[in-house]
């Protein structure tokens, strides 16, 4: 039995619960026969992928749901082997080039050309083109994005590209201009409420509104998280009544602890202790920006009003550096030291 | 003078009062107090302003400095030490200077004001410039007017007090000096009372006063002057003291040598006051480096004296002080004993040394007395008889040795080459065992072994003999270069009547050549026919010794050479001496078993000294013994190198001073490669950035380039482990604040470094940025936090960068996570980080928690859940491993009983599971990889070039084939499981 998120995921555009306008537009685009390249962007858990799959279903019919997974090996110019997982149906193919790290350009060039140069063989297919879905498009390197540009125009007849990204800011302008931009915003609280109660109905129980509010507050616009939390809660206390404590995921509590460490003591020894925790978080695949964001929010909630702005300023400052640089921990640590220094000076002045 | 000093302190409080008094007027006259950073700061500034009429300068400084740094430190620094020191010491020195101030300073003064102007201009509104300019052109007349102008200016414009007026004031004062004293009071302008009082005094000493204001601004050495007599000046001086400490001593230094005694007294009086011992302070280096000059003492004026240095001198680092003592012929020993003549005491002297001083009743000197001693002591004349005699004896010995050498040369002269055309190393090679420097015991052993050789042969190498050497047919001499290994071997052979045959790295020594050349196997008639029993013009007889020099240099060209040599050693009827540098070398392993090991040490300097002195005498060079010691130490007892250095030097000069010797040794320094641990400890250590450090920025960057990949990581790992030397002047909470400030600077510099690194290793590969990277990632962070630490007595030892391990762990887990993600992909739309952040915590209660809480009975449910998401047992492991905090893998696994775990594994393996896809690596590629041709033999790989190419080509072809095969096969296989998956789904 799958988790509810996956079990009750809408499969057709008509089944979607919110962003109706978007659904309508997608529907008419799919019907028009003049389907453009598209760029779906929005925060995670907003429903980008769900909408993409629904659109594909609208375009090609139920056939797109027959997925298979393939693993391809590409050779980098330096003869290194790069393994990339590909999810595909008869009508579309889905890749995550960022899996290839620095060699995403190779994947884009080889794979896209290969697909683009072959026409749809299935005569019964509804459309003459195939769709390529590129996940995590915002982590494509500039080279890879540049490699996309010409391909997108040249092979338009055989192929449409759907890019999925959290933000458009790291995409180069030429790509953006070649796509129809589709913003999938995070659902509002009411929209989440509807979805949650829909899920509850499908799972045959009643969701008390207070519980729903609690969950919505905790999830911060991430519907996936909200539904997962709902299920966990349901498991925890089946009647969902009374005061609910939503269990935070392990990494979040861990980040909270780091924040407490920062505020309680400001010494080099403490920095090294925190460094060890950072390593722990990073090596357990928590993205550095998430770490920084979570900890910064936790620290800010524990300090004086006047320091908040500054702490956030430096968090932003070092987040940019983290994205540009290569060794994330250096920047995380620099931020921690900065915060400690600010905090200590504040303490000192208060004396 | 004395009274003025005393009054100086009281004047501060008084200043405050006055300030309060003036406060109103100031404010009223100046509408906007331009420079009023904070109330606290204000108090200082104002007092300064009021008391010192003529100079607005000091207050300005204060304000500016106080802006940048929080107030407390300035107080701490300024009041206690600095002000006191200059006052006490300076006065005597000052008097004479005062005298010349009229004449010579005039020029100086001119210049300084100019500097002032420019500096002030930055801060102050444009207005002032005109005023200042105006005053210059026509000094005398305008002055009075100027003053008036100032007043006017002051009233309307706010900033003036601090900024503008200063310029003008200074200017005017300069002119005053030239002209007439009276103006000053006027120049003071805005401030009523103090000035008047001063002006009276000033009439006589006006010249002095004027220069005073300028100097503080110029931050030059002139401060002592300020402190001379007037209250005002004193006050200025003390306010200046807030600036970093070093300057004061500088002032002292000027007065330096001539006034030593007075100072010395003061200094000694002060010294004992500090009982507690502060290691950190000592390691941090002198307080006021370079502030004193070394007097031009007489050559060898310290000869025969033994010194002990302890504690931290104020202007020299220990190293420098020791150098100075040596330069003047003194002997420096480590710990005081009854034979020590003087102990030079610095701050924070070691307690044990102090105890020893008491015990032996040793004479102590402070820094100034030490310098004084150098300046005044008459050289050799004062030496006591014993030392004189000893020196005489040494000299005679040298002369006789030189004569002997000459004689020998003459004798030999007729039959051999002209000695003057020979290298010194050849010409002065030792001729008998006495002349060998150091390693006497080893050489004697070697000699005995050779002497006993015929007997040993007779006995079949059964009798060990005295040294246990006679069972060996070969000796392996090891040791660093230039200490006479080859020379000893040759000489011993000659002395024992053996004819040496030497094979060194210039000869090919492959297996074949060694075997045939020596006719070891006796398989060839070569020897009989070709007459090749003659080698190097020598007949091989039983009185021949084979010297295999530079054995560790047997390289790839000498393939099998070592083996053949070893085989030869086993049978040889001729003694074999092998010589190598590094005993631990892998190549020498076989030899070590079959030969007697004879390690040579570096000879001590005094062994070498007399020999080199003799040679120098013979070459008519005048080089004092301490210089030779310097050379020897610099070359690490490499006699050959010292001789070569000298023979080069001889071409240009006959004499060499201590400093020349030092630079020469430095130039010839052997380039040493350090490992990252050493570099880090050097970099972060207390000396690298101390004020006495002689390393240039280039030298520091050079350390980075020794290992540019590791150094940034090492620095990042260890930069927080020091006790920064920069903090030694702070205490309590302020210290912590400052510490964090330094840490912040260092950390942000490391962060900068990473950005540069990204440019270097990024797609654009800006390798030219490496020097910048060196500075950002290594030099700059270290410059903030250098100090005591690992390897310098600190608590934390230098550790290997965690980053490497953690990074590979991250890569590994991230790969495992993407396996999990792609398996779940058929059901889940999220990407990797979503899986980690949302799904794994959500799945945990379903597939791990039951096992922890219930046990083996729920295994089937768990497996069902896993199948739902196509997760395998490995993925289950990954999910557990990715846990953090209270879900950390070891905690979790501890809670799952072994029985449960085995049941899970068994049941999982025992049942069938839906598989979303086959990994490419699962499709029979792995076995092929293993079987893809035999792994290339390492020997072969090194031996021949072509075969290697072939192998790799094959590999490539294989790989291609495989990938094609796999691609063809993969879909077929996939289809099946896919259907299966589909079935299970529905």
Image: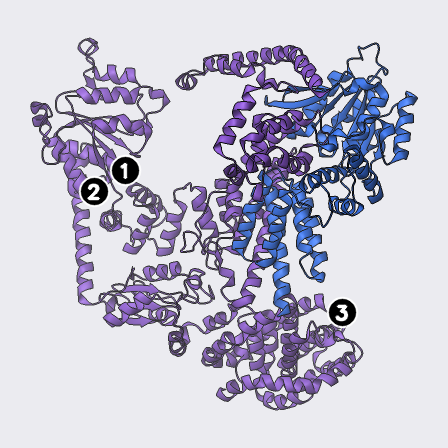
Q: Which of marks 1 and 3 is nearer the N terminus?
A: 3
Q: State the separation of the CA atoms marked 1 and 2.
A: 11 Å
- Please tell me the numbered disc located at residue B125: 3
Q: State the separation of the CA atoms marked 1 and 3.
A: 72 Å
Q: Circle 1 — which element?
A: loop
* Rendered-image quadrant of the C terminus of chain B: top right
Is residue B307 or residue B927 the one in the foreground? B927
Residue named by callout 2? B439
Q: Circle 3 — which element?
A: loop
Residue positioned 36% across, 59% down in the render: B323
Q: Quadrant of residue A142?
A: top right
Is residue B376 or residue A245 the one in the foreground? A245
B519 over B813 or under it: above or below: above
Is residue B821 or residue B646 the one in the foreground? B821
Residue positioned 69% across, 51% down in the render: A297
Numbered disc in front, either 1 or 3? 1
B409 over A115 or under it: above or below: below
Q: In this view, does A107 lie to the left or right of A118?
A: left
Q: Mark 2, chain letter? A: B
- Please tell me the numbered disc located at residue B378: none
Q: State the separation of the CA atoms marked 2 and 3.
A: 76 Å
Is residue B955 or residue B578 the one in the foreground? B955
Residue named by callout 1? B479
Q: Report x, y in % for residue B249.
A: 48, 70
- The type of colouring in the image is by chain
Q: In this view, does B767 lie to the left or right of A308?
A: left
* Chain B as rendered: colour: purple
């Amino acid at each position: 039995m799958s988790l509810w998120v996956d079990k009750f995921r809408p499969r057709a555009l008509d089944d979607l619960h919110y962003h109706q306008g978007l659904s309508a537009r997608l529907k008419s685009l799919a019907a028009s026969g003049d389907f453009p390249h598209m760029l779906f962007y929005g925060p995670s858990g907003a429903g980008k992928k769900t909408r993409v799959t629904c659109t594909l279903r609208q375009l090609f019919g139920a056939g797109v749901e027959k997925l298979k997974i393939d693993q391809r090996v590409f050779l980098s110019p330096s003869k290194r082997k790069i393994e990339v997982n590909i999810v595909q149906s008869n009508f579309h193919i889905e890749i995550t080039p960022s899996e290839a790290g620095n060699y995403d350009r190779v994947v884009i060039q080889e794979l896209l050309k290969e697909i683009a140069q072959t026409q749809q063989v299935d005569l019964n297919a509804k459309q003459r083109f195939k769709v390529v879905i590129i996940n995590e498009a915002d982590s494509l390197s500039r080279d890879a994005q540049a490699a996309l540009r010409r391909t997108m125009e040249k092979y338009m007849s055989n192929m449409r590209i759907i890019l999925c990204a959290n933000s458009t800011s790291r995409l180069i302008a030429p790509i953006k201009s070649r796509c129809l931009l589709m913003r999938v915003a995070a659902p509002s609280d009411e929209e989440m409420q509807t979805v949650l109660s829909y899920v509850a109905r499908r799972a045959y129980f009643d969701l008390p509104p207070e519980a729903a509010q609690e969950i919505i507050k905790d999830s911060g616009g991430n519907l996936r998280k909200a539904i997962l939390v709902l299920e966990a809660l349901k498991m925890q206390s089946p009647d969902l009544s009374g005061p609910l404590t939503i269990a935070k995921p392990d990494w979040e509590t861990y980040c909270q602890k780091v924040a407490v460490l920062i505020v309680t003591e400001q010494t080099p020894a403490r920095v090294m202790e925190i460094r060890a925790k950072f390593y722990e978080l990073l090596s357990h695949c928590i993205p550095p920006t998430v770490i920084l964001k979570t900890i910064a929010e936790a620290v800010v909630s524990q300090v004086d009003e006047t320091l908040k702005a500054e702490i956030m300023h430096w968090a932003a400052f070092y987040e940019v550096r983290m994205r540009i640089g290569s060794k994330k921990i250096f920047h995380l640590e620099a931020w921690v030291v900065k915060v400690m220094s600010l905090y200590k000076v504040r303490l000192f002045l208060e004396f | 003078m004395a009274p003025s000093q005393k009054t100086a302190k009281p004047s501060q409080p008084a200043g405050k009062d006055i300030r309060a008094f003036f406060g109103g007027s100031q404010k009223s006259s100046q509408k906007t107090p331009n420079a009023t950073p904070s109330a606290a700061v204000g108090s200082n500034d104002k007092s300064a302003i009021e008391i010192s009429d003529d100079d607005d300068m000091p207050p300005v400084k204060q304000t500016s400095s106080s802006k940048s740094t929080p107030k407390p430190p300035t107080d701490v620094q300024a009041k206690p030490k600095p002000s006191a020191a200059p006052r006490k010491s300076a006065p005597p020195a000052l008097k004479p200077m005062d005298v010349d101030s009229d004449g010579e300073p005039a020029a100086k003064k001119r210049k300084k004001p100019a500097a002032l102007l420019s500096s002030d201009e930055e801060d102050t509104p444009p207005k002032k410039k005109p005023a200042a300019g105006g005053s210059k052109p026509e000094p005398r007349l305008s002055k009075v007017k100027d003053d008036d102008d100032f007043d006017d200016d002051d009233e309307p414009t706010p900033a003036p007090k601090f900024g503008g007026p200063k310029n003008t004031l200074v200017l005017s004062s300069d002119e005053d000096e030239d002209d007439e004293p009276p103006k000053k009071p006027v120049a003071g302008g805005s401030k009523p009372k103090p000035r008047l009082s001063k002006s009276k005094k000033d009439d006589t000493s006006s010249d002095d006063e004027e220069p005073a204001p300028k100097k503080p601004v110029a931050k030059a050495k002139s401060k002592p002057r300020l402190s001379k007599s007037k209250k005002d000046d004193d006050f200025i001086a003390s306010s200046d003291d807030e600036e970093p400490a070093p300057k004061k001593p500088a002032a002292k230094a000027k007065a330096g040598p001539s006034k030593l005694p007075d100072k010395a007294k003061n200094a000694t009086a002060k010294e004992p006051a500090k009982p507690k011992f502060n290691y950190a302070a000592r390691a941090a280096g002198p307080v006021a480096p370079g502030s004193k000059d070394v007097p031009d003492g007489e050559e060898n004026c310290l000869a025969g004296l033994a010194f002990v240095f302890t504690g931290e001198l104020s202007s020299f680092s220990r190293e420098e002080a020791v150098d100075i003592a040596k330069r003047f012929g003194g002997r420096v020993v480590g710990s005081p004993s009854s034979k020590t003549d003087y102990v030079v005491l610095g701050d924070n002297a070691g307690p044990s040394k102090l105890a020893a001083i008491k015990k032996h009743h040793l004479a102590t000197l402070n820094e100034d007395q030490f310098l004084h001693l150098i300046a005044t002591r008459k050289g050799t004349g004062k030496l006591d008889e014993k030392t004189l005699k000893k020196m005489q004896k040494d000299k005679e010995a040298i002369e006789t040795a030189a004569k002997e050498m000459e004689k020998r040369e003459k004798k030999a002269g007729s039959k051999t080459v002209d000695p003057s055309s020979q290298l010194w190393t050849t010409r002065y090679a030792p001729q008998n065992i006495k002349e060998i420097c150091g390693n006497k015991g080893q050489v004697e052993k070697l000699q005995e072994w050779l002497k006993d050789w015929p007997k040993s042969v007779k006995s079949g190498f059964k009798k060990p003999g005295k040294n246990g050497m006679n069972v060996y047919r070969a000796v392996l001499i090891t040791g660093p270069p230039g200490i006479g290994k080859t020379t000893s071997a040759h000489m011993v052979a000659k002395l024992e009547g053996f004819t040496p045959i030497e094979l060194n790295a210039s000869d090919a020594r492959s297996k074949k050549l060694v075997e045939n050349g020596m006719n070891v196997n006796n398989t060839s008639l070569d020897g009989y026919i070709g007459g090749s029993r003659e080698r190097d013009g020598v007949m091989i007889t039983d009185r021949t010794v084979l010297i295999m020099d530079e054995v560790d240099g047997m390289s790839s060209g000498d393939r099998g050479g070592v083996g053949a040599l070893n085989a030869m050693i086993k049978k040889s009827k001729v003694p074999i001496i092998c010589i190598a540098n590094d005993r631990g070398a892998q190549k020498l392993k076989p030899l070590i078993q079959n030969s007697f090991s004879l390690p040579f040490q570096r000879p001590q300097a005094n062994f070498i000294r007399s020999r080199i002195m003799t040679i120098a005498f013979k070459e008519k060079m005048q080089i004092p013994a301490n210089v030779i010691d310097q050379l020897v130490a610099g070359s690490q007892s490499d006699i050959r190198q010292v001789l070569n250095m000298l023979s080069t030097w001889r071409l240009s000069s006959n004499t060499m001073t201590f400093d020349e010797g030092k630079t020469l040794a430095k130039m010839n320094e052997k380039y040493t490669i350090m490992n990252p641990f050493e570099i880090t400890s050097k970099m972060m250590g207390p000396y690298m950035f101390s004020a006495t450090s002689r390393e240039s920025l280039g030298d520091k960057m050079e350390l980075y380039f020794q290992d540019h990949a590791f150094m940034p990581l090492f620095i990042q790992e260890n930069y927080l482990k020091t006790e920064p030397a920069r903090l030694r002047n702070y205490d309590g909470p302020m210290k912590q604040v400052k510490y964090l400030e330094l840490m912040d600077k260092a950390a942000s510099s490391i962060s900068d470094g990473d950005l540069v690194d990204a440019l270097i290793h990024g797609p654009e590969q800006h390798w030219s940025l490496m020097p910048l990277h060196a500075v950002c990632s290594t030099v700059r962070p270290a410059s903030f936090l250098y100090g005591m630490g690992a390897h310098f007595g600190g608590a934390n030892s230098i550790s290997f960068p965690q980053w490497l391990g953690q990074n590979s762990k991250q890569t590994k887990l991230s790969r495992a996570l993407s396996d999990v993600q792609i398996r779940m992909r058929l059901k889940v739309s999220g990407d990797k980080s979503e899986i980690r952040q949302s799904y794994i915590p959500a799945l945990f209660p379903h597939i791990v928690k039951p096992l922890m809480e219930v046990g083996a009975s729920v295994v089937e449910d768990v497996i069902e859940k896993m199948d739902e998401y196509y997760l395998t047992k490995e993925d289950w492991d990954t999910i557990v491993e990715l846990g953090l905090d209270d879900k950390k893998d070891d905690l979790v696994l501890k809670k799952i009983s072994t029985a449960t775990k085995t049941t899970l594994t068994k049941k999982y393996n025992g049942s069938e599971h839906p598989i979303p896809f086959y990994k490419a690596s699962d499709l029979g590629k792995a076995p092929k990889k293993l079987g893809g041709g035999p792994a290339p033999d390492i020997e072969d790989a090194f031996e021949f070039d072509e075969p290697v190419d072939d192998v790799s080509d094959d590999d490539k072809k294989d790989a291609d084939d495989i990938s094609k095969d796999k691609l063809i096969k993969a879909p077929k296989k996939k289809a099946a499981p896919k259907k299966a998956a589909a079935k299970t789904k529905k």
